Image (cartoon, grey):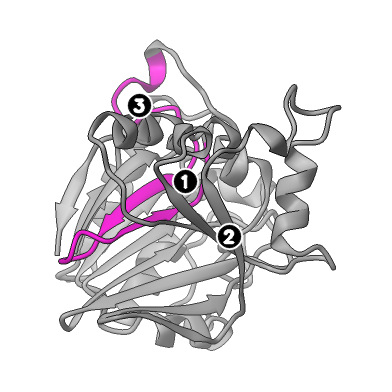
Amino acid sequence: MKFKFWGTRGSVPVPGASTLHYGGNTPCIEIRTSQNKLFIIDAGTGIRELGNRLCNENFHDDINILISHTHWDHIQGLLFFKPFYSKDFTINIHAYNSNGMNVDHIFDTLMSPPYFPATKEVIKTKTFFKELEGEKTYSFDDFKIETIKVHHSKGTLAFKFIENGKQLVYMTDNEILYEHHKDEYPLKAEIIEKNQDLISFCKDVDYLIHDAMYQISDYDKKIGWGHSNNISLAIFAMAANVKNLILFHYEPDYTDEMIDELIKETKNYLLNNESKINLIASYEKMELNI
């Protein structure tokens, strides 16, 4: 299994000189199985460039797009995914049936006249809509995907990808819960108590990709927004005994230099607590193999 980042930013795309290193596109990750099956997690603006590449490389196998939830930053690139407008592809869109709306209704809404200049008639590829549920396991031959609901808005899922004994978890837009006290670090015991189900889901995984939207000094203004700070995430990852922790879904107002500081603080916290976790900061076009 290998995976590549096409968008790492949260909330809104932020192109410009101050975001060149970590990137300004919103969430999109490409996963290739050992058999070269393609899974795409989320359809933020990063999916546009991925779609262009797939068309240029003449990829003609099924494309599976998994939507963690339907907030704008996770679907705003969907209609700019070039394979939709080609007869050469079959695309399966997997998402949670959220707020009484099924998956194809969400797609129809995106393509309605007030928001988009074209209707579904321009879609040339075979497109299928498939519902995901929380706490379920889905099998694609030897490749398995487990799901769990996270601490965000209704209908937000995390995914665990399993192949050949290796495990990758994608858990963005998740707020690690604890009683926040200004200028104090979270208590490990409290994080374990309030997040036990999610910690168990991530237990001993090879890679955890997780929302690290805020540096802890900014978190007190964002409590309840459904995102995590870097220190609570470090404690969460230690409790889950993950091997590699990947920071993701950066605050749009953070420049590259501010993300450098967030990484430095997180790394120092792990080192000071004698953690062996390998900390990785995601950036656009970063590719890793498991």
Closer to the chain start, of discs 1 and 2, is 2
- In the picture of the structure, the residue carrying the numbered disc 3 is 256
Q: Secondary structure at mark 1?
A: loop
Name the residue that disc number 1 marks: 249
What amino acid is at disc 2?
Phe
Q: Amino acid at mark 1?
A: His
Q: CA distance from mark 1 to mark 2?
A: 28 Å
User: Which residue, given by chain and number where applicable, does mark 2 sit on?
Assistant: 128
Q: CA distance from mark 2 to mark 3?
A: 38 Å
Where residue 80 sits: x, y (%)? 54, 30
Q: Secondary structure at mark 3?
A: helix
Q: Earlier in the sequence, mark 3 or mark 1?
A: 1
Rendered position, 164 above or below 9:
below
- Numbered disc in front, either 2 or 3: 2
**Amino acid at circle 3:** Asp
Whole-percent x, y for residue 281 in the image: 28, 45
